[in-house]
């Protein structure tokens, strides 16, 4: 958001009055959107993950998904659950799991009360996808949740809490403006990577080897969450200055960027794998 803000300030003088009013309104709207706490990877992160996954879906599961989504591809609906959450507040906790940052294992009774966390909800919606008795509407909705939640659980700050609502209340300075650590990992770092979702997905996909794919498909959703949790310990908080607000330095970004890129790759591979297993009757 910040580079847009800066360049428009300088462009303002040479711009027509009408155009500058439009731009100001647009900036206020985008500013408000970025100020929303606790949403997932931004739209871009979710789209990149779905674009990678599309390349690994079998023809049958791709056709099944498109049918359940009334003709849409999975990347078009990857952020639907964040919009749904705005009017359905009870679904907010479905997007994360607050495992205390210092812990090394999950306590489901404490951290996933009544199944209201990203692990239980992902498993529950996967079960709907493969249930032969579930109707098309229920399956379509389950598919949209699965696409989104596999993304969320690969964002390390969705797998932890450090007494700061998953980093939402941890103040940072990013690019000369005050923000919070959660937003930096959802949106800010990806903005600096500065590629279109299609270009970034293609670049990340080109790095994935058949061995990576085989390795990443192993394990359970719990294992993947703990992988993210360890990255929160070692990188997201481990490399963070203890200052308040903490500066997000070039050195910090250098540690964080490869982590973000690898998490997007893993999420794409694992999403495709789960959809192939659950939509295409396990014909792998
Ligand atoms: N709200 C509270 N904890 C959160 C987390 N870990 N991720 C996203 N939103 C949250
Ligand atoms: Zn988030
Ligand atoms: Zn989310």
Image: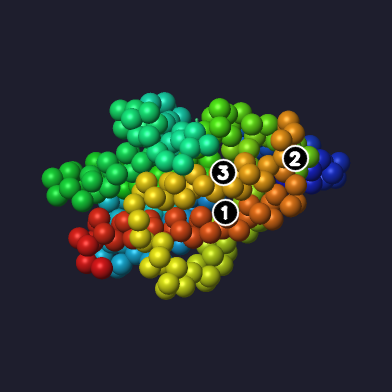
Q: Which quadrant of the figure contains the C terminus?
A: bottom left
Outermost residue to the left: 133
Q: Residues within 10 Å of mark 1 (few under 14, many from 20)?
A: many
First-in-chain label (1 vs 2): 2
Q: Regarding mark 1 in the picture, which secondary structure is present there? A: helix
Q: Residues within 10 Å of mark 2 (few under 14, many from 20)?
A: some
Residue 46: percent from the left, percent from the top?
48, 50
Distance of label 1 from label 2 (alpha carbons)? 19 Å
Decide if ligand 2 comes within 8 Å of the CB at mark 1.
no
- State the residue at coordinates (30%, 28%): 114
For label 3, the residue is 233
- State the residue at coordinates (53%, 37%): 102
Whether residues under marks 1 and 2 lie with C-beta atoms below 8 angstroms apart, the answer is no
Q: Is residue 81 left or right of residue 8?
A: left
For label 1, the residue is 260
In this view, 215 is above or below 263: below
Decide if ligand 1 comes within 8 Å of the CB at mark 3.
no
Q: Colour scheme used in the picture?
A: rainbow
The quadrant holding residue 93 is top left
- State the residue at coordinates (66%, 54%): 255
Distance of label 3 from label 1 (alpha carbons)? 14 Å
Q: Is residue 279 left or right of residue 43?
A: left
Residue 68: percent from the left, percent from the top?
27, 51
| Residue 83 visible | no
């Amino acid at each position: 958001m910040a580079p847009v803000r800066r360049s428009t300030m300088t462009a303002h003088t040479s711009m027509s009055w009408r155009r500058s009013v439009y731009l100001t309104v647009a900036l206020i709207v985008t500013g408000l959107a970025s100020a929303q706490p606790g949403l997932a990877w931004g739209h871009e992160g979710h789209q990149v993950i779905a674009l990678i996954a599309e390349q690994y879906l079998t023809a049958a599961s791709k056709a099944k998904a498109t049918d359940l989504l009334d003709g849409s591809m999975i990347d078009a609906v990857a952020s639907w659950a964040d919009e749904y959450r705005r009017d359905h507040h009870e679904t907010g906790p479905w997007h994360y799991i607050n495992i205390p940052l210092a812990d090394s294992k999950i306590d489901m009774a404490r951290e996933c009360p009544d199944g209201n966390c990203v692990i239980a909800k992902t498993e529950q919606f996967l079960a709907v996808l493969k249930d032969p008795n579930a109707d098309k509407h229920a399956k379509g909705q389950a598919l949209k949740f699965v696409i989104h939640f596999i993304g969320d659980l690969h964002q390390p700050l969705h797998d932890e809490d450090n007494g700061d609502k998953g980093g939402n209340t941890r103040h940072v300075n990013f690019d000369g403006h005050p923000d919070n650590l959660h937003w930096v990992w959802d949106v800010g770092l990806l903005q600096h990577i500065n590629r279109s979702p299609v270009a970034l997905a293609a670049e990340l996909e080109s790095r994935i080897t058949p061995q990576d794919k085989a390795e990443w498909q192993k394990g359970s959703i719990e294992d993947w969450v703990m992988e993210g949790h360890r990255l929160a310990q070692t990188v997201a908080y481990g490399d963070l200055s203890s200052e308040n607000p903490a500066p997000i330095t070039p050195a910090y970004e250098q540690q964080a960027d490869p982590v973000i890129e690898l998490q997007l790759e893993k999420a794409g591979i694992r999403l495709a794998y789960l959809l192939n297993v659950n939509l295409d009757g396990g014909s792998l």
